[in-house]
């Protein structure tokens, strides 16, 4: 029986049983910071994968000292850190922290040189490089970099996930689930899948100047968590997001735990605490508002470097009006794809090229449909869809009446309940004919966030190596080995990025445009 007692989850649990995963860290690498980062993040991700993962055995030398710079869940040693994390997360997954592999699992994720037990995925990391194999042990090096370590964890956990769901691929209509066979090395520095790519050391202190993070969800939160895992960081960050941590989203929020959900902590407050607790040289301005309601209090300098990890297309387009010097975006799809963009106005495609404002705007279409079904007016629903506005007492009362009168199979929203929470409760019942809703698998948006943290670091420390201008790959199908980043040029018919006034505004604010 699951904690939530959801009927569909119980069925899924039976179907996917036993879902037993072992993640192990061998003694020969247990004291390497890079191995610890990879291991901690793999545990963090795996524990959130219920009901695919139902039992998680975390195996490591129990006395290993904690040597990695981890932003949360401190412990007197590495095992204690893992226990602290899992206790605070309270996952539906049954878990144990032990020294030995007790039984053959459904899948085994090995960091280091543990003996394989059952189908095994081997993981290693060194600096910017992630190493993955179905065949042999992978080396973890001495270069410490959370971007490479966390990307390795995402790749390794995705391989475990694929092996667990592979017998049940009918659950994923038409989407191929293809476990890796063989060995691959992925550079988070160049996005090339091959060995011998540049793998420079991080500077002793990573300085990223000012950064505005709009949207602190799965991707934005993972980016913040990755930056918070650096050895030393200086930054002036603004974090903008109106939402609180809540239980249904915990599987996607690697930076949050169940205590945060119970306290309904604001996401931006959590990002602030994560970063400010770790670094004296970092300030985070927590702005718990929707982007549209924040605009008046953002200054020109807040738009120099912007990470748009926001769900809303409208907010993305609004951000573009401020012509950021560099605008990063990330996304993930229900088919396990992750995508990242680095946009420079007039040089690469812009948010308006990418998501044109047409009559077909999915958020507006959704608002129309909700209004037809439930009343309240399109404008009201649009704000809820775009900004995740909460229901007022009066709206909740009117909806209760409507739902009862029309005998709709819908849960009545509570006063002060966020739109996304209400929508999640009605999942599978709220039938909308259109819209661009996605149900990403958690490690895909997290991967996008981790890589974007890498881009933010490169922007200041390795400007010659920044993304130009788009990269994507998949964590569910076969990981593509021959798709390098590609330049996405402005669309010829885009009314925004060819607009002389906006191009002049860009140059006035930031000087000449260049991608690198
Ligand atoms: Zn454009």
Image (cartoon, rainbow, N blue to C red):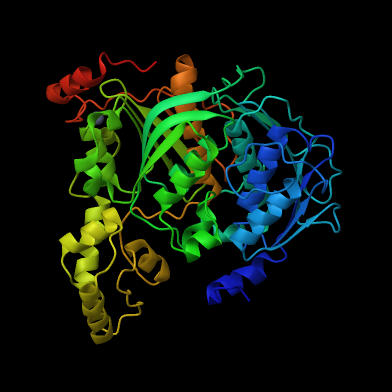
Q: Residue at x 39, y 72 (%)?
A: 429
Quadrant hosting residue 327: top left
How many marks are shown on the rendered structure? 0
Quadrant hosting residue 474: top right
Task: Please provide percent x and percent y for residue 310.
Answer: 35, 45
Quadrant hosting ligand 1: top left
* Identity of the residue furthest to the front in this view: 280
Residue 355 to residue 438: above or below: above
Q: Is residue 239 left or right of residue 43?
A: left
Q: Residue at x 24, y 66 (%)?
A: 370
Q: Is residue 278 left or right of residue 164?
A: left
Task: Please provide percent x and percent y for residue 457.
Answer: 48, 26
Q: Is residue 473 left or right of residue 47?
A: left
- Residue closer to the observer: 99 or 401: 99
Quadrant housing the N terminus? bottom right
Residue 33 to residue 80: above or below: above
Task: Please provide percent x and percent y for residue 294.
Answer: 24, 45
Quadrant housing the C terminus? top left
- Residue closer to the observer: 352 or 31: 31
Q: Residue at x 84, y 50 (%)?
A: 117
Is residue 6 shown to the viewer in this render?
Answer: yes
Quadrant hosting residue 368: bottom left
- Residue closer to the observer: 170 or 72: 72
């Amino acid at each position: 029986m699951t904690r939530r007692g959801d009927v569909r989850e119980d069925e899924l649990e039976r179907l996917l049983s036993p879902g037993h995963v072992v993640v192990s860290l061998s003694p020969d690498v247990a004291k390497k910071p890079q191995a610890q980062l990879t291991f901690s993040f793999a545990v963090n991700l795996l524990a959130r994968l219920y009901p695919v993962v139902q039992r998680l055995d975390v195996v490591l030398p129990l006395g290993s000292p904690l040597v990695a710079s981890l932003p949360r869940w401190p412990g007197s040693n590495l095992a204690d850190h893992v226990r602290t994390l899992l206790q605070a997360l309270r996952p539906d997954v049954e878990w144990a922290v032990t020294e030995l592999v007790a039984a053959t699992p459904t899948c085994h994720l090995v960091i280091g040189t543990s003996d394989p037990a059952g189908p095994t995925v081997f993981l290693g990391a060194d600096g910017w490089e992630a190493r993955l194999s179905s065949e042999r042990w992978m080396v973890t090096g001495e270069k410490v970099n959370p971007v490479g370590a966390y990307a390795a964890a995402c790749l390794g956990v995705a391989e475990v996930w694929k092996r667990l769901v592979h017998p049940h691929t009918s659950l994923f209509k038409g989407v191929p689930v293809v476990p890796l066979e063989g060995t691959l090395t992925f550079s988070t520095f160049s996005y090339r899948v091959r060995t011998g790519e540049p793998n420079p050391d991080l500077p002793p202190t990573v300085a990223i100047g000012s950064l505005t993070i709009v949207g602190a969800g799965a991707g934005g939160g993972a980016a913040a968590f990755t930056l918070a895992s650096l050895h030393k960081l200086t930054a002036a960050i603004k974090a903008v997001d109106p939402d609180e941590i809540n239980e249904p989203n915990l599987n996607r929020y690697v930076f949050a735990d169940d205590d945060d959900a119970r306290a309904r902590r604001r996401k931006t407050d959590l990002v602030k605490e994560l970063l400010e607790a770790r670094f004296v040289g970092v300030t985070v301005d927590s702005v718990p508002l929707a982007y549209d309601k924040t605009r008046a209090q953002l200054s020109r300098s807040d738009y120099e470097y912007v990470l748009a990890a926001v769900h809303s297309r409208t907010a993305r387009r609004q951000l573009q009006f401020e012509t950021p010097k560099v605008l990063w975006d990330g996304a993930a799809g229900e088919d396990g794809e992750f995508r990242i963009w680095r946009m420079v106005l007039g040089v690469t495609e812009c948010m308006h090229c990418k998501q044109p404002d047409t009559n077909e705007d999915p958020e507006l279409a959704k608002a129309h449909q909700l209004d037809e079904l439930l009343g309240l007016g399109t404008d009201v629903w649009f704000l809820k869809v775009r900004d995740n506005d909460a229901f007022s007492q009066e709206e909740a009362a009117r909806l209760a009446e409507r739902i009862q009168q029309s005998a709709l199979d819908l849960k009545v929203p509570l006063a002060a309940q966020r739109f996304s929470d209400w929508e999640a409760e009605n999942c599978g019942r709220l039938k909308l004919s259109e819209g661009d809703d996605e149900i990403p698998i958690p490690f895909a948006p997290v991967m996008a966030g981790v890589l974007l943290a890498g881009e933010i670091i490169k922007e200041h420390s390795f400007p010659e190596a920044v993304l130009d201008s788009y990269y994507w790959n998949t964590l569910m199908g076969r990981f593509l080995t021959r798709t390098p980043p590609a330049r996405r040029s402005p669309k010829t018919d885009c009314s925004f990025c060819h607009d002389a006034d906006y191009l002049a505004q860009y140059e006035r604010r930031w000087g000449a445009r260049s991608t690198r």
